[in-house]
Structures are given as C-alpha cells and as structure tokens.
Image (cartoon, helix red, strand yellow):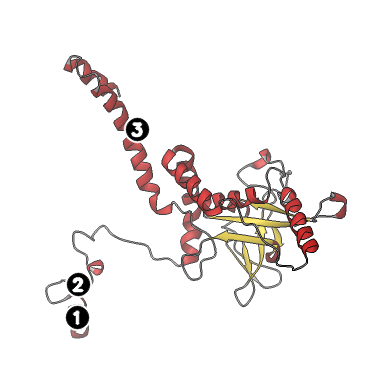
Amino acid sequence: MSFFSNLKRQLFGSKGAPIYDGVGSGRRSVAWMPGNLGAVATLAYAQDDLRAKSRDLIRRNAWAAAGVEVFVANAIGTGIKPQSMVADNLIREAIHALWWDWCEEADAAGLTDFYGLQALSVRAMLEGGEAFIRIRYRQQIDNLIVPMQLQVLEPEHVPITYNAVAENGNRIRCGIEFDSFGRRVAYWMYRSHPLDALASPMSSVGDNLIPVRVPAAEVIHLFRPLRPGQIRGEPWLARALVKLNELDQYDDAELPNSRIDELLPLPPEFIEILRKNN
C-alpha cells in the first residue's frame, strides 16, 4: 500500500493537487471523461454521424456553406496546369494541346472538366472528410482522345463497416484491403451510392450493396491524415459542428425578438403576447 501511496503523492501532490491540471478530478474536470480510441477505431465508430451532421450544416447554415466555398476557391483557384519541359517546340505544343483536349473529356460523368473535378473532389473531402477518385480506363470504341477518365466518388462508396479477411489472406479494414506490410492494395467499393438506392443511375437490382474489389493503383484516396495509422478521413467541420449548430439556433431565436423590439411604440402587453407566440 505504501508504494501506491507514494506514487499518488508524487503524481498528485500531498494535498491532491495534480502536476498536470488535465490529470485532476476536481470540479472543472469531473464531467470531462474523454474517449481514447485509436486512429482507425475513432473514425470507424464516428465517421457516419460526423459526415451526416457536416453535410446537414453545410446545406442549412450559410456560414458553413460560405466557408466551404471560400476554401475550395482558394485551394483550387484556376486549377493545376502542368507545363511541359520538352525542348522541341512542336512536341511541346502537341503535348499541351493533347492535355487540354483530355481535360475536356476527363470527367467520367460528362458534367465538368478536369478542373471542375479538382474543385468537386476538394469539396467532397471538406464535407465528408474524404473523397475517392477512381481512374477509369476506357476502350478504343469509346472514341476518347485519351482512353482514361476520372470518377469522383463520395466516401459512402467504400463501406467503413466492411471488415474481413480476403481470400488471398489480406486484411480488409474499413473497406480498404492491406497486405502483410500494411500497404493499401485494393479498395472495396459499392457500384452505386448506397444511400441513393434505386435512385442512382448506376444502380441495379440485387448487387447494389455487394462491394467490388478495385486495385489501389486505380484509386486516389483524398483525405487529410491527422494521426499516425489513420486510414479514413475526418470531416473538416468536425470540431465546429456543435458550435455552428447552436449558433444557428441562437440566431434563429434572436431574429424574431429583434423584429419585435422595433415595435416598442406598441403597448407592452401586446409586445409580450408577440414574444410568447414566437
């Protein structure tokens, strides 16, 4: 018992004062009971909820939406424009011409160009914490200048709850397949967005929720790693979700009151009735 008493005294002092404030259990910390899961388990349990709330705020909250728009505009700007370093002028111009022609056909959905895909990918990463860009190799019959297109996918396409052991012995964690060295070798993807069901143009009855193995060489996983060992992305608004939601509710509650205050010349009894009705 003396060993533990000495240890407690060295850590917390003779009068219960901790060496670190964060270690104490006083009135300021008694309700502070943080979880301490690993980088993978933390997002495996929380990502779906964080993603849903993040998208909801961006849809409803003008400040959140404006913040995302500004970040995308500043991060992408006019887009990445490569410059050929070939010395021969004719070859260099041919390369540039081929590049610009491919940019127009880069989107597998046919909605935008390569630079629009960059902005869309960053926006998806901000909202949902990550984005997957699948490289689609095409056939000659598709009549493309370069037989390759890019498809931007939301994180739901890779099920974070999918954990298994592949037939080749590799481990699948959060929808990502790793070899024995911990390297990504494949992603297990749904053919269509699982939350769109039959509304998706890529949906088909029976196999919507059966993940398909896609080699990692054909997938770009865009996310911001914040912890060693992290394998999935965290929505960028995760730390501000509660504050933004409460601020939005406070703003909605105060606006009617401020309009009622403009009616001060009216009798106080009438103003009180208006406040209660709002």
Residue drawn at (68%, 41%) of the image: 200
Circle 2: residue type: Pro
The foreground one among 117 and 80 is 80
Cβ atoms under marks 1 and 2 closer than 8 Å? no
| Disc number for residue 272 | none
Looking at the figure, which quarter contains the N terminus? bottom left
Q: Quadrant of the C terminus?
A: top left
Q: Which residue is mark 3?
A: 252
Q: CA distance from mark 2 to mark 3?
A: 43 Å
Reading the chain from its start, which is encountered first: label 3 or label 1?
A: 1
Q: Which residue is mark 2?
A: 18
128 or 222: nearer the eye? 222
Q: Is residue 243 left or right of residue 267?
A: right
Crowding near the residue tagged with mark 3, few <14, some 14–19, many ≥20 C-alpha atoms within 10 Å: few
Which numbered dot is residue 10?
A: 1
Coordinates of residue 262 in the picture (x, y in percent): 25, 21
Q: Tell me the residue at 44%/44% (across/down).
A: 64
At a point 46% along the width and 51% down the height, the residue shown is 50
Amino acid type for the residue under numbered disc 3: Asp
Work out how far the residue at label 3 is from the one at label 1, CA to CA, in angstroms: 51 Å
The extreme left residue here reads 15
Q: Position of residue 131 (x, y in %)?
A: 59, 55
